[in-house]
Image: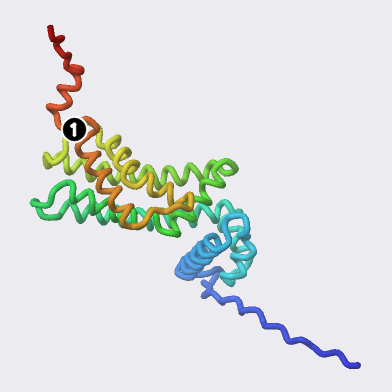
Amino acid sequence: MGLTATRTKPAAPRREMPKSRGGRPTKTAAIERDQRLIEVATRLFLDRGFEATSLDAVAEAARVSKPTVYSRYGDKRGLFAAVLRREIARWLAPLSAAAETQLSSAADISVEQRLVEIGREMLSFTCGPDAVAFSRMMTSQAINFPDVAKLGKEEGWLKAVATTARFFDHLVAQGALDVEDTTIAAEVFLDVVVGHTHRMATFGTALEPKSAEKRMRIAIKLFLAGALGPADRVRDAAKGPARRRSSR
Protein backbone atom coordinates (compact mmCIF):
# COMPACT_ATOMS: atom_id res chain seq x y z
CA MET A 1 0.00 0.00 0.00
CA GLY A 2 1.50 3.33 -1.02
CA LEU A 3 1.43 6.51 1.00
CA THR A 4 -0.57 9.46 -0.33
CA ALA A 5 1.19 12.79 0.16
CA THR A 6 -0.96 15.71 1.27
CA ARG A 7 -0.19 19.07 -0.27
CA THR A 8 0.09 21.87 2.26
CA LYS A 9 -0.61 25.47 1.40
CA PRO A 10 2.64 27.38 1.15
CA ALA A 11 3.12 30.16 3.67
CA ALA A 12 2.70 33.70 2.42
CA PRO A 13 6.09 35.07 1.44
CA ARG A 14 7.56 37.63 3.78
CA ARG A 15 7.48 41.07 2.26
CA GLU A 16 10.91 42.29 1.27
CA MET A 17 11.65 45.79 2.52
CA PRO A 18 13.80 48.31 0.67
CA LYS A 19 17.19 48.47 2.37
CA SER A 20 19.59 51.35 2.80
CA ARG A 21 23.26 51.01 2.00
CA GLY A 22 23.91 49.89 5.56
CA GLY A 23 21.48 47.00 5.16
CA ARG A 24 18.79 48.51 7.39
CA PRO A 25 15.30 49.38 6.09
CA THR A 26 14.92 52.87 4.70
CA LYS A 27 13.05 55.42 6.81
CA THR A 28 10.04 55.27 4.49
CA ALA A 29 10.01 51.47 4.54
CA ALA A 30 10.27 51.41 8.34
CA ILE A 31 7.30 53.79 8.66
CA GLU A 32 5.24 51.65 6.28
CA ARG A 33 6.20 48.54 8.25
CA ASP A 34 5.13 50.11 11.55
CA GLN A 35 1.83 51.27 10.06
CA ARG A 36 1.19 47.77 8.73
CA LEU A 37 2.00 46.24 12.12
CA ILE A 38 -0.39 48.60 13.90
CA GLU A 39 -3.16 47.95 11.38
CA VAL A 40 -2.75 44.19 11.70
CA ALA A 41 -2.52 44.34 15.50
CA THR A 42 -5.63 46.50 15.66
CA ARG A 43 -7.60 43.99 13.64
CA LEU A 44 -6.39 41.05 15.72
CA PHE A 45 -7.09 42.76 19.04
CA LEU A 46 -10.61 43.60 17.87
CA ASP A 47 -11.26 40.11 16.47
CA ARG A 48 -9.64 38.04 19.24
CA GLY A 49 -9.37 40.30 22.26
CA PHE A 50 -6.27 41.12 24.27
CA GLU A 51 -5.61 37.73 25.88
CA ALA A 52 -5.94 35.68 22.67
CA THR A 53 -3.69 37.93 20.59
CA SER A 54 0.02 37.09 20.57
CA LEU A 55 2.99 38.96 19.14
CA ASP A 56 3.83 35.86 17.11
CA ALA A 57 0.39 35.97 15.49
CA VAL A 58 0.81 39.67 14.71
CA ALA A 59 4.23 39.08 13.17
CA GLU A 60 2.90 36.26 11.01
CA ALA A 61 -0.17 38.20 9.85
CA ALA A 62 1.91 41.31 9.10
CA ARG A 63 4.56 39.19 7.35
CA VAL A 64 7.46 40.55 9.33
CA SER A 65 10.01 38.78 11.49
CA LYS A 66 9.26 38.11 15.15
CA PRO A 67 12.47 39.83 16.33
CA THR A 68 11.32 42.97 14.52
CA VAL A 69 8.04 43.06 16.48
CA TYR A 70 9.73 42.34 19.80
CA SER A 71 12.47 44.91 19.25
CA ARG A 72 9.95 47.57 18.21
CA TYR A 73 7.34 47.12 20.96
CA GLY A 74 8.98 44.96 23.63
CA ASP A 75 5.92 42.96 24.60
CA LYS A 76 2.20 42.71 23.96
CA ARG A 77 1.45 45.51 26.39
CA GLY A 78 3.73 47.85 24.43
CA LEU A 79 2.03 46.89 21.17
CA PHE A 80 -1.43 47.35 22.68
CA ALA A 81 -0.41 50.79 23.99
CA ALA A 82 0.73 51.80 20.49
CA VAL A 83 -2.56 50.59 19.00
CA LEU A 84 -4.59 52.33 21.70
CA ARG A 85 -2.71 55.61 21.22
CA ARG A 86 -3.42 55.54 17.49
CA GLU A 87 -7.10 54.70 18.00
CA ILE A 88 -7.58 57.45 20.59
CA ALA A 89 -6.10 59.98 18.17
CA ARG A 90 -8.60 58.83 15.56
CA TRP A 91 -11.49 59.20 18.02
CA LEU A 92 -10.44 62.69 19.12
CA ALA A 93 -10.00 64.04 15.60
CA PRO A 94 -13.78 64.34 14.93
CA LEU A 95 -14.26 66.15 18.26
CA SER A 96 -11.61 68.74 17.39
CA ALA A 97 -13.03 69.13 13.88
CA ALA A 98 -16.57 69.52 15.21
CA ALA A 99 -15.47 72.15 17.73
CA GLU A 100 -13.65 74.13 15.04
CA THR A 101 -16.69 73.90 12.75
CA GLN A 102 -19.04 75.18 15.43
CA LEU A 103 -16.71 78.06 16.30
CA SER A 104 -16.84 79.25 12.71
CA SER A 105 -20.58 78.66 12.30
CA ALA A 106 -23.06 81.46 11.72
CA ALA A 107 -23.71 83.77 14.64
CA ASP A 108 -27.46 83.11 14.53
CA ILE A 109 -26.97 79.43 15.48
CA SER A 110 -27.77 78.97 19.16
CA VAL A 111 -25.26 77.62 21.66
CA GLU A 112 -27.61 74.73 22.31
CA GLN A 113 -27.58 73.69 18.65
CA ARG A 114 -23.81 73.98 18.53
CA LEU A 115 -23.51 71.66 21.52
CA VAL A 116 -26.00 69.26 19.97
CA GLU A 117 -23.84 69.00 16.85
CA ILE A 118 -20.75 68.33 18.95
CA GLY A 119 -22.61 65.84 21.14
CA ARG A 120 -23.93 63.98 18.11
CA GLU A 121 -20.41 63.71 16.70
CA MET A 122 -19.10 62.44 20.03
CA LEU A 123 -21.77 59.78 20.31
CA SER A 124 -20.94 58.47 16.86
CA PHE A 125 -17.28 57.77 17.63
CA THR A 126 -17.30 57.01 21.38
CA CYS A 127 -20.16 54.52 21.10
CA GLY A 128 -19.00 52.85 17.88
CA PRO A 129 -18.12 49.14 17.98
CA ASP A 130 -14.34 49.67 17.81
CA ALA A 131 -14.29 52.30 20.57
CA VAL A 132 -16.47 50.12 22.78
CA ALA A 133 -14.28 47.04 22.17
CA PHE A 134 -11.10 48.92 23.09
CA SER A 135 -12.78 50.42 26.14
CA ARG A 136 -13.61 46.94 27.38
CA MET A 137 -10.06 45.69 26.79
CA MET A 138 -8.56 48.72 28.52
CA THR A 139 -10.86 48.29 31.50
CA SER A 140 -10.09 44.59 31.81
CA GLN A 141 -6.33 45.21 31.70
CA ALA A 142 -6.27 48.32 33.90
CA ILE A 143 -5.50 46.46 37.14
CA ASN A 144 -2.71 44.31 35.70
CA PHE A 145 -1.29 47.11 33.53
CA PRO A 146 -1.99 50.46 35.22
CA ASP A 147 0.16 52.26 32.66
CA VAL A 148 -2.41 51.30 30.00
CA ALA A 149 -5.16 52.90 32.09
CA LYS A 150 -2.96 55.96 32.57
CA LEU A 151 -2.47 56.20 28.80
CA GLY A 152 -6.23 55.99 28.24
CA LYS A 153 -6.80 58.77 30.77
CA GLU A 154 -4.04 61.11 29.58
CA GLU A 155 -4.34 60.55 25.83
CA GLY A 156 -8.11 60.09 25.76
CA TRP A 157 -10.17 61.60 28.56
CA LEU A 158 -7.93 64.54 29.47
CA LYS A 159 -7.37 65.56 25.83
CA ALA A 160 -11.11 65.37 25.17
CA VAL A 161 -11.69 67.58 28.22
CA ALA A 162 -9.01 70.04 27.06
CA THR A 163 -10.49 70.24 23.56
CA THR A 164 -13.98 70.85 24.92
CA ALA A 165 -12.70 73.38 27.45
CA ARG A 166 -11.00 75.39 24.67
CA PHE A 167 -14.31 75.43 22.80
CA PHE A 168 -16.04 76.70 25.94
CA ASP A 169 -13.32 79.37 26.36
CA HIS A 170 -14.30 80.76 22.96
CA LEU A 171 -17.99 80.72 23.88
CA VAL A 172 -17.22 82.55 27.13
CA ALA A 173 -15.18 85.13 25.21
CA GLN A 174 -18.14 85.63 22.87
CA GLY A 175 -20.47 86.09 25.83
CA ALA A 176 -22.43 82.97 24.89
CA LEU A 177 -21.56 81.10 28.10
CA ASP A 178 -20.96 82.25 31.66
CA VAL A 179 -18.95 79.65 33.59
CA GLU A 180 -16.20 80.08 36.17
CA ASP A 181 -14.10 77.07 35.19
CA THR A 182 -14.32 75.78 31.62
CA THR A 183 -12.34 72.63 32.45
CA ILE A 184 -14.87 71.54 35.08
CA ALA A 185 -17.68 72.54 32.73
CA ALA A 186 -16.10 70.37 30.00
CA GLU A 187 -15.85 67.38 32.35
CA VAL A 188 -19.49 67.74 33.34
CA PHE A 189 -20.57 68.19 29.73
CA LEU A 190 -18.72 65.08 28.51
CA ASP A 191 -20.01 62.97 31.37
CA VAL A 192 -23.68 63.92 31.16
CA VAL A 193 -23.85 64.03 27.36
CA VAL A 194 -22.02 60.82 26.37
CA GLY A 195 -20.86 59.13 29.59
CA HIS A 196 -24.01 57.14 30.32
CA THR A 197 -24.60 56.14 26.69
CA HIS A 198 -20.98 54.98 26.33
CA ARG A 199 -21.16 52.96 29.56
CA MET A 200 -24.34 51.24 28.41
CA ALA A 201 -22.69 50.34 25.11
CA THR A 202 -19.67 48.98 27.00
CA PHE A 203 -21.99 46.82 29.11
CA GLY A 204 -23.57 45.42 25.95
CA THR A 205 -26.86 47.28 26.36
CA ALA A 206 -26.47 50.02 23.79
CA LEU A 207 -29.30 52.53 23.46
CA GLU A 208 -31.21 52.83 20.23
CA PRO A 209 -30.05 55.80 18.13
CA LYS A 210 -33.29 57.72 18.70
CA SER A 211 -33.12 57.15 22.45
CA ALA A 212 -29.46 58.19 22.55
CA GLU A 213 -30.26 61.36 20.57
CA LYS A 214 -33.17 62.22 22.87
CA ARG A 215 -31.08 61.66 25.98
CA MET A 216 -28.27 63.80 24.58
CA ARG A 217 -30.58 66.72 23.83
CA ILE A 218 -32.17 66.62 27.28
CA ALA A 219 -28.72 66.38 28.91
CA ILE A 220 -27.56 69.45 26.98
CA LYS A 221 -30.63 71.43 28.05
CA LEU A 222 -29.94 70.45 31.66
CA PHE A 223 -26.27 71.40 31.27
CA LEU A 224 -27.12 74.83 29.86
CA ALA A 225 -29.94 75.61 32.32
CA GLY A 226 -28.42 74.10 35.44
CA ALA A 227 -30.35 72.00 37.92
CA LEU A 228 -32.00 75.05 39.51
CA GLY A 229 -32.91 76.76 36.25
CA PRO A 230 -32.99 80.55 35.70
CA ALA A 231 -31.16 82.97 38.00
CA ASP A 232 -34.36 84.26 39.63
CA ARG A 233 -35.28 80.72 40.59
CA VAL A 234 -31.83 80.25 42.11
CA ARG A 235 -32.33 83.34 44.26
CA ASP A 236 -35.75 82.10 45.38
CA ALA A 237 -34.35 78.67 46.23
CA ALA A 238 -31.57 80.23 48.30
CA LYS A 239 -34.17 81.98 50.45
CA GLY A 240 -35.78 78.67 51.29
CA PRO A 241 -39.41 77.58 50.97
CA ALA A 242 -42.01 80.23 51.60
CA ARG A 243 -43.83 79.86 54.90
CA ARG A 244 -47.57 79.61 54.89
CA ARG A 245 -49.46 81.92 57.19
CA SER A 246 -51.71 80.11 59.57
CA SER A 247 -55.37 80.97 59.13
CA ARG A 248 -57.26 82.00 62.19
Q: Nearer the viewer, residue 224 or 32?
A: 224
Q: Which residue is mark 1?
A: 229
| Secondary element at tag 1 | loop
Amino acid, disc 1: Gly
Badge 1 crowding class, 10 Å Cα cut-off, few under 14, some 14 to 19, many 20 or more, is few
Q: Position of residue 229 (x, y in %)?
A: 18, 32
Quarter of the image with the C terminus is: top left
Q: Residue at x 15, y 54 (%)?
A: 104
Q: Residue at the left extreme?
A: 108
Q: Along the horizontal axis of the image, is 90 left or right of 76? A: left
Q: Quadrant of residue 49?
A: bottom right
Q: Residue at x 56, y 70 (%)?
A: 62
Q: How many marks?
A: 1
Q: Residue at the bottom extreme?
A: 1
Q: Residue at the top extreme?
A: 248
Q: Residue at x 47, y 69 (%)?
A: 32
Q: Position of residue 170 (x, y in %)?
A: 18, 43
- The vertical placement of 124 against 153, above or below, is below
Q: Position of residue 233 (x, y in %)?
A: 15, 27
Quarter of the image with the N terminus is: bottom right
Q: Along the horizontal axis of the image, is 157 left or right of 133? A: left
Q: In the rendered image, is residue 69 in sight? A: yes
Q: In the rendered image, is residue 23 in sight? A: no
Q: Residue at the right extreme?
A: 1
Q: Quadrant of residue 10?
A: bottom right
- The vertical placement of 240 against 37, above or below, is above
Q: Position of residue 231 (x, y in %)?
A: 14, 29
Q: Nearer the viewer, residue 128 or 33?
A: 128
Q: Nearer the viewer, residue 57 or 115?
A: 115
